[in-house]
Amino acid sequence: MDKVEELKPEVEEISCDEVENRDDIGEGSTSVSQNEHDEIIATEKVLNAMLFYRRYGITRIQMSITSYQ
């Protein structure tokens, strides 16, 4: 029991340090999530452009081909 009581303050100090480190990680994860959010928006823009081209670009190409025939 004496050894447990001696180690108890050391364990409490470690847990306090871990909480401080977790706060730092939380701030880093916020910037990471912001980067992920920016990447998602950029990907959505690219996909929307591809869908627009598929819907309207091919139709315009087909219309110009039929007009030349």
Image (cartoon, grey):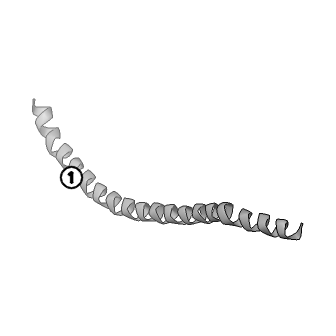
> Which quarter of the figure has residue 67?
bottom right
How many numbered marks have been drawn onto this rendered protein structure?
1
Image quadrant of residue 66? bottom right
Residue 21 lies, with reference to residue 7, above or below; the image says below
The residue at the point 42 percent across, 65 percent down is 34
User: As displayed, is residue 33 above or below residue 67?
Assistant: above
Where residue 46 sits: x, y (%)? Answer: 60, 64
Q: Is residue 5 left or right of residue 24?
A: left
Q: Residue at x 41, y 60 (%)?
A: 33
Question: Quick one: SS at disc 1?
Answer: helix
The residue at 13%/39% (across/down) is 6
Whether 36 is drawn above or below 67: the answer is above
Residue 51 location in percent, x, y? 62, 60
The N terminus lies in which quarter of the figure?
Answer: top left
Q: Is residue 7 above or below residue 48?
A: above
Q: Residue at x 14, y 33 (%)?
A: 3
Q: Is residue 24 left or right of residue 9?
A: right
Q: Which residue position holds label 1?
A: 16
Looking at the picture, tell me which residue is in the foreground, 44 or 61.
Answer: 61
Residue 1 vs residue 64: left or right?
left
Outermost residue toward the right in this view:
69
Give the position of the C terminus as an image quadrant. Answer: bottom right
When asked about the image quadrant of residue 5, the answer is: top left
> Percent from the top left, x then y, of residue 25?
35, 58
Q: Amino acid at mark 1?
A: Cys
The crowding category of the residue bearing disc 1, from other C-alpha atoms within 10 Å (few below 14, some 14 to 19, many at least 20), is: few
